[in-house]
């Protein structure tokens, strides 16, 4: 008994079909192909990210001693085997080819399909979708003057409800955060706590996924010195991971700032709910991030008069985030400082 071979899909080919349909003004086909390419990219990213996170946490430990960095080498050799097996199974399960070109990946990361889709939707007289596609692209490219004009045009059309124009790739934490603020402004303390705690959890999860994407890096400057080549790659990965925090701009300068803001909303809401123990944890964690914040120091004094000092326990996940962020920034500062020193020495 023979089985029919499963058909595998190529993200590269689907994307190129979208470009071809656009160039030939086949608007309906353009929509189908670019929507499919976005769907496939979501699957592709999910397989890659899930495998990287899985292999990071499940890399087996052996009895190899840490002689001349052997433990480090062992980690990456084990991770390589884990990633290869995990990705092969993951792409087989979703019936996709893994060999996507860097160019197509870069286009999808830059949300290029939406620049095509808005015109295709427009030509098919679907202005609400055209408006959201344009806005989605504009979020990723806020300095694009033409796209800004397009958004302004769409929201003036009677078919388009400005409130329904959304970023089609916005993250869950952004939605939850806005809902939390709305609940806070209405003094709905239970809803505020729920939404803000969920926003906090989703933000940490989202950034871990964003950071995992950074393991795919373009080729770095090569050197015959092993340590130099490795450090160049490490600096590139760390720079990419730090760039994930740009998602919170322009309202916040860093992930630490948005976490602190969420903690502030939570501690106030806990106070109104008479859940002082929980409020104390939020205050203690906030002060670990910003120890000189006068308002929060005053809150700590108030809560200390109501509960035992031992209740001021920091939230582990946020403290881990803070320390990781701080140490990554220090490493990058040191790398660039040394890099600039070498450059200056060579130009003397």
Image (cartoon, helix red, strand yellow):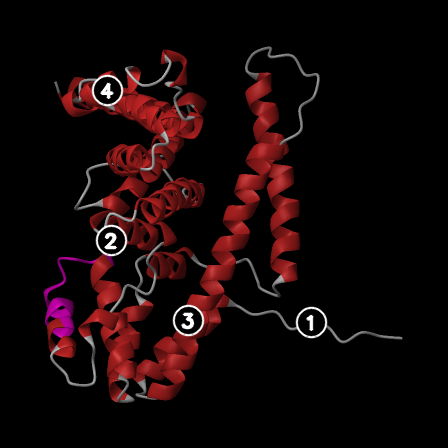
Question: Which stretch appears magenta?
Answer: 140-151
For the point 24% across and 49% down, the residue is 181
Q: Which residue is mark 2?
A: 182
Instruction: Kindly indicate whether the residue at mark 2 contacts the one at mark 1 (C-beta within 8 angstroms).
Output: no
Q: Is residue 165 left or right of residue 77?
A: left
Q: CA distance from mark 4 to mark 3?
A: 59 Å
Give neighbour class at mark 1: few <14, some 14-19, many 20+ (Cα, 10 Å). Answer: few
For the point 66% across and 53% down, the residue is 89
Q: Which residue is mark 4?
A: 302
Instruction: Kindly indicate whether the residue at mark 1 contacts the one at mark 4 (C-beta within 8 angstroms).
Output: no
Q: Which residue is mark 3?
A: 15
Closer to the chain start, of discs 1 and 2, is 1
Q: CA distance from mark 3 to mark 1?
A: 21 Å
**Is residue 322 inside the magenta stretch?**
no
Q: CA distance from mark 2 to mark 3?
A: 39 Å
Does 17 sit above or below residue 182? below
**Is residue 147 inside the magenta stretch?**
yes
SS for callout 1: loop
Q: CA distance from mark 4 to mark 1?
A: 65 Å
SS for callout 4: helix
Tag nearer the camera, 1 or 2: 2
Q: Which residue is mark 1?
A: 6
Give neighbour class at mark 3: few <14, some 14-19, many 20+ (Cα, 10 Å). Answer: many
Tag nearer the camera, 4 or 2: 4
Q: Is residue 271 left or right of residue 211?
A: left
- Of residue 253 and residue 310, the one placed in the foreground of this image is 310
SS for callout 3: helix
Q: Is residue 157 left or right of residue 19?
A: left
């Amino acid at each position: 008994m023979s089985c029919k071979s499963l058909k595998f899909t190529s993200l590269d080919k689907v994307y190129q079909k979208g470009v071809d349909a656009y160039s030939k003004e086949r608007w309906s086909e353009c929509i189908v192909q670019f929507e499919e390419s976005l769907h496939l990219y979501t699957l592709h990213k999910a397989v890659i990210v899930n495998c990287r996170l899985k292999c990071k946490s499940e890399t087996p430990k052996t009895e190899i001693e840490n002689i001349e960095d052997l433990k480090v080498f062992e980690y990456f050799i084990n991770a390589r085997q884990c990633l290869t097996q995990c990705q092969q199974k993951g792409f087989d399960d979703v019936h996709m080819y893994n060999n996507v070109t860097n160019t197509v990946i870069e286009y999808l990361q830059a949300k290029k399909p939406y620049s095509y889709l808005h015109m295709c939707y427009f030509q098919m007289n679907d202005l609400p979708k055209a408006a959201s596609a344009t806005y989605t692209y504009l979020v990723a490219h806020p300095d694009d003057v033409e796209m800004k004009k397009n958004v302004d045009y769409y929201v003036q059309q009677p078919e388009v409800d400005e409130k329904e124009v959304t970023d089609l790739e916005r993250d869950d934490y952004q939605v939850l955060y806005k809902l939390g603020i709305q609940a806070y402004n209405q003094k709905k303390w239970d809803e505020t706590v729920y939404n803000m705690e969920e926003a906090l959890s989703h933000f940490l999860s989202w950034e871990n996924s964003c950071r995992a994407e950074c393991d795919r890096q373009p080729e770095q400057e090569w050197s015959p010195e092993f340590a130099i080549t490795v450090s160049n790659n490490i600096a590139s990965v760390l720079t990419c991971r730090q760039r994930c925090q740009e998602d919170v701009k322009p309202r916040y300068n860093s992930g630490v700032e948005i976490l602190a803001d969420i903690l502030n909303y939570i501690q106030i809401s806990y106070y109104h709910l008479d859940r002082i123990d929980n409020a104390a944890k939020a205050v203690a964690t906030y002060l670990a991030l910003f120890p000189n914040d006068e308002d929060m120091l005053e809150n700590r004094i108030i809560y200390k008069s109501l509960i035992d000092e031992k209740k001021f326990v920091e939230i582990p996940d946020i403290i881990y985030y803070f320390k990781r962020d701080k140490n990554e920034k220090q490493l990058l500062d040191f790398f660039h400082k040394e890099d600039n020193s070498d450059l200056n020495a060579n130009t003397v």
